[in-house]
Amino acid sequence: MQDIQQNETRATLLVTCKDRPGLVAALAQALYTQGANILDAAQHTDSESAKFFQRIQFDDPELAGPDRDGAMRRLEATVRGVANLHEMDWQLHYEATPARVAIFVSKTDHCLYDLLLRHRSGELRCEIPLIVSNHETLRGVADHFGVPFHVFPVTAETKAEVEKEEIKLLESEQIDLVVMARYMQILSGDFCDHFAARVINIHHSFLPAFAGGRPYHQAFSRGVKLVGATAHYATRDLDEGPIIEQDAISVTHCDTPKDLVRRGRDVERRVLSRAVRAHLERRIVVYDNKTVVF
C-alpha cells in the first residue's frame, strides 16, 4: 500500500451560507486570531440563489504540537463561532487524516486499474483498504495491488440483505468515500442516503443525455458526434445526482458501437479520477443537486 505523507498542520475549510457583506473578512479574521496562515482561498457567489461558497486551505502550527486534540477543539470552536453568527454550513478537514476509499467494481477493469495506479503513484492521496465486487473476475487485480477483495453476489431477491452487509463492512472499515468504478449495479436509495455525497459514480455518457443502460448504443442509434462520460454523486434518482466532472470526445459516422465503447474508456478513466481527486482534496460543495468545484 502507498505510504501517505500528509502535512500535520494543514487543514481545509468549506463553507456555504446566504451571501452578505463581510463573510470573507470574518473567516479570514477568525483564522488569523487562531494563529493560522491562509495558504489558498477561493470563493463563489451564486447570483440566482444568493448563496456564498468558500474554500480555505490553511496552516495551523498548533496542530503539530503536543496537544493536537486540544488544538483541533480550539480551531473548531473558532470556526463554529463565525459559522453560527452568519448561519453557515461548514466542514473542516485535516490533511493528516486521509480519506478511506472503497472501490466498487463488477467485471470491467479499466477504471479500477487507473485508480489503483494513480493511488500508487501518489496522485490520489487517500487510503484504499478494500475493493467490493459482485463478481470474482477482478480479484487478480486487487491481489496485484495488495488490496483486500470482497465479493457480494447480488440478485434481485438478495439485494436488500447484501447492501446491509456491504454497509456493515464499510462502516467497520470507517470508509469515507465509495467509488463506483463501473459497478454494474444500481444502489438503493437507502444506500445512497446512508452515504449522501460520499458515493461517486462514473456514467459512460454526457449526462443528462443517454441515462440508464447501454448509453453508447443509445448514442450510436442517435448518430451523435460527441460521446462523453460523467462523474456524479449517486442519489436515489438514477443518473441524476450532482455532477462533479464531465468530458467528451468527437466521433464520426464511421464509429461502431464497439468503437464508442473502446474510445469512451479513456474518457471514463480521466473523468472519474478527476472527480475522485477533487473530492479527496475537499474542493467540492454540493447544493441544490449541483456542485461548486473549486
Image (cartoon, helix red, strand yellow):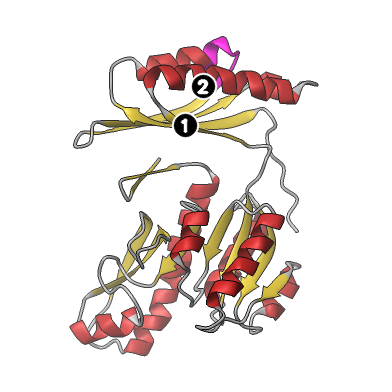
Check the image and report above or below for 194 versus 141.
Answer: above
Name the foreground residue: 206 vs 120.
Answer: 206
Quadrant in the picture for residue 35: top right
What segment is highlighted magenta in the picture? 31-37
- Depth check: 288 or 267 in front? 288
Q: Position of residue 275 (x, y in %)?
A: 46, 55
Q: Earlier in the sequence, mark 1 or mark 2?
A: 2
The type of residue carrying mark 2 is Arg
The quadrant holding residue 170 is bottom right
Q: Which quarter of the image is occupied by the N terminus? A: bottom right
Q: Residue at x 38, y 72 (%)?
A: 204
Q: Which mark is residue 90?
A: 1
Q: Is residue 3 above or below residue 105?
A: above
Q: Does residue 2 show up magenta in the picture?
A: no
Mark 1: which amino acid? Trp
Give the CA separation, mark 1 to mark 2. 8 Å
Circle 2 Cα neighbour tier, 10 Å, few/some/many (<14 / 14–19 / ≥20): some
Task: Say which element carries label 1.
Answer: strand
- Residue 153, horizontal then vertical, whole percent: 61, 82
- Location of the C terminus by quadrant is top left
Question: How many dots with numbers?
Answer: 2
Left/right placement of residue 131 relative to residue 203 reads: right
Identified at 59% across, 13% down, the residue is 34
- Tell me whether the residue at label 1 lies in contact with that at label 2, contact meaning CB atoms closer than 8 angstroms: yes
Q: Is residue 35 magenta?
A: yes
Q: What residue do we see at 35% from left, 64% from top? A: 237
Q: Dot 2: what SS? A: helix
Q: Which residue lies under the disc numbered 2?
A: 80
With 63 as the anchor, is 221 left or right in this view?
A: left
Q: Quadrant of residue 287?
A: top left
Q: Is residue 4 above or below residue 186?
A: above
Residue 274 percent coordinates (x, y): 47, 55
